[in-house]
Amino acid sequence: MNDQNNNVLEFKDVWKIYQMGDEKINALAGVNLNIRDGSFTSIMGPSGSGKSTLLHVGGILDMPTRGNLLLNGKDTSTLSGKEQATFRRNEIGFVFQRFNLMPQLSALENVLLPMIKPDLEKAKELLDKMGLEGKHNKRPSQLSGGEQQRVSIARALINNPSLILADEPTGELDTKNAEVIMGILQDLNKKEGVTIIIVTHNPLAAEFTDEIIEMRDGNII
């Protein structure tokens, strides 16, 4: 359940600092940001602005150097490594630019990967919902880029997460397939209330979202 202020994700003065030789790089520089339940948000900005770092920290793939990240009201810094992995699997679905599908597995098997107890019928229903009827047993190499991204969206949804994080979900796609993928994400948000954050360089993709947040030099501007 979400906390009382209806925020799925909260960044509270979050810093992510990398040491590069003698230089310190502030990938995130005191970010304060609330992501509301049921929102559809895009993060934009030039390369090196901190967009992907924000997504990685928000997905508990990386921990802040300082500051606090709350997911559904839970301070993630209080979790052990094992608890973080469990929380990440149960609460967050990831969609990546290059799909990150296992090449030796079928579409159906890829969708089932995040589940502890495989639910074949649910996975099949999600693939059908993505317009992949009859392609459950195809391997990624037998699918188009747009179809592969739809498999990855089904995989992201399989555990009923509180939040979908998509890193450049249209980056490997042509305009037509990019519009299809963004339409699917928009429908998930509008019709089913799924909270979604995307990082994108593509202004056409950002137009599908309700809020555009711009970043520069580790800050929200």
Image (cartoon, rainbow, N blue to C red):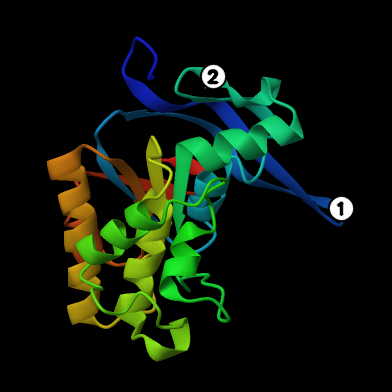
Q: Which quadrant of the structure image shows residue 105?
A: bottom right
Residue 21 vertical position relative to residue 79 in the rendered view, above or below? below
Instruction: Give left or right: position of 10 versus 124.
Output: right
Q: Which residue is found at the position 39% from the left and 79% from the top?
A: 172
Q: Which residue is mark 1?
A: 22
Instruction: Give left or right: position of 88 versus 16.
Output: left
Q: Which residue is found at the position 33% from the left and 86% from the top?
A: 144
> In this orientation, which residue lies closer to the viewer: 101 or 129?
129
Could you tell me which quadrant the C terminus lies in?
top left
Counting from the top left corner in percent of width and height, residue 9 is at 43, 29
Q: Which residue is found at the position 68% from the left and 30% from the top?
A: 83
Q: Which residue is mark 2?
A: 74
| Mark 2 neighbour class, 10 Å CA radius: few under 14, some 14 to 19, many 20 or more | some
Counting from the top left corner in percent of width and height, residue 193 is at 21, 37
Residue furthest to the top? 4
- Please name the amino acid that badge 1 sits on: Asp
Q: Earlier in the sequence, mark 1 or mark 2?
A: 1
Q: Is residue 81 something that shows in the picture?
A: yes
Q: Are marks 1 and 2 in contact (CB under 8 Å)?
A: no
